[in-house]
Image: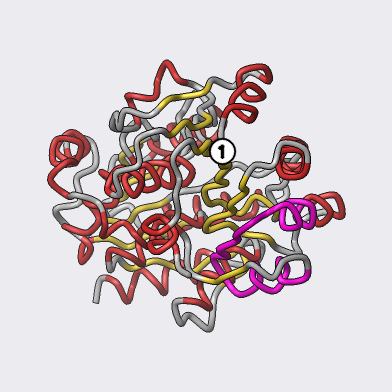
Amino acid sequence: MNIINFFLKTNLEKSFIIGYYGGLNFGDELLLEVILNLLKNNGVKDISFYYTSPEIYSHYHHDFGYKKIPATPLDMLKEVFKCKNIIIGGGGLWGLDFNKNIALLSLILFFAKYFLRKKIYLIGVGYYLSTTKLGRFAGWLAGFSSDIIIARDNETFRNFSRVSRNIFIDNDIVFNFHELDEKLYTSDVDELKKEVDISEKTIFITTRRFSGDKYASFKEEIQKFIEKNTDKKIIMALFEAKIVDKEGYNFFLDVSKKYKNITVVDFHYNPVALLFLFSYHHKNIAMISPQFHGQLVAHLTGASFLPISYDNKNSELFKSIGIKYFFDIKNVSYFDMQNFINHFYE
């Protein structure tokens, strides 16, 4: 079974979809938009989904007529009792980014399965040994509680196979973006074009939030690279809303004040718009980014990108698309970035 067949053949009426939605992270919002499209395309009517910030949902998504559940424990618990199915819709939840909320989610899945008799589906998810001991236990608990698991890569498949026989392997949910109706996003793309001009060769740089200063060297290498490329067009794109990553946004602004060739863009648009914009201008884009879904969007649209890994999920993505050699974020240098860009401009 693959993801398309799951959505096509499974009765998903009265499903409650849970993910890190509403946190205004590009990858998670992209996952949600693709999932809601797939459900709508298959005529599913009774759907609810967890969304942290319902009041700003319309800034990032189309309205598919589904019910948004706000981020309060009581509202979430009520929906767990009311629904027939719970879908965990993508994301590398059990990996380096594991946290206490995901541990709680895993407990909720166990409770919903064995006390409330709900169907539990983990679709296009990631589970990696880069997680903590608690993360491994939570991954085991979620897998043990699931009726169907569709892993997005080989490591996830191996890890969940230890606790479940109802497991299949496919790719990340975003691989199915071709199922979306491109015409629905024309106005979204037009709006984004006003800020993200990639009609000529452009270097697209993103960073991401990391706890502590563990990856400070990556930002330092980015700055060195920018200093050497003041003659090239550069977009520094924050893949989170600036209200979420104020430090990252200020870092971008500080750099842009020094160099006139830089445009700064934060994440405040429908994520599918960027995907289609990349597809239209893929020959003009060279991306330097450690972010999983940024790299995936570049790959799916044919844009060039430097393969940088900060977690097993990146490494597994590269392996799945035939990239054998990639850079560890701790070791990648501005020389590596420059070599990549030199090939792009040849």
36 over 289 or under it: above or below: above
Q: Name the spot of residue 313 as percent of width and height, x first.
A: 60, 63
Identity of the residue drawn at 50% across and 50% down: 223
Q: Nearer the viewer, residue 125 or 162?
A: 162
Question: At 25% across and 71% down in the image, what residue appears?
Answer: 345
Residue type (three-letter) at the residue carrying disc 1: Lys
Q: Is residue 168 left or right of residue 203?
A: right
Query: In the image, is 322 to the left or to the right of 117?
Result: left
Q: Is residue 279 above or below residue 235?
A: below
For label 1, the residue is: 84
The image shows residue 182, relative to residue 337, as above or below, that is: above
**What's the magenta region?**
139-162
Residue at the farthest right position: 133
Q: Give the quadrant of residue 129.
A: bottom right
- Please tell me which residue lies in front, 153 or 258: 153
* Above/below status of 324 relative to 135: below
* Image location of residue 229, percent across then percent down: 35, 57
Q: Is residue 331 magenta?
A: no
Q: Is residue 303 left or right of residue 228?
A: left
Q: Residue 285: where, in percent of width, then height? A: 27, 60
The mark tally for this picture is 1
162 or 90: nearer the viewer = 162
Q: Quadrant of the C terminus?
A: bottom left
Label 1 crowd (10 A; few <14 / some 14-19 / many >=20)? some
Q: Quick check: 136 left or right of 77? A: right
**Depth order, front residue of 162/205:** 162
Image colouring? secondary structure
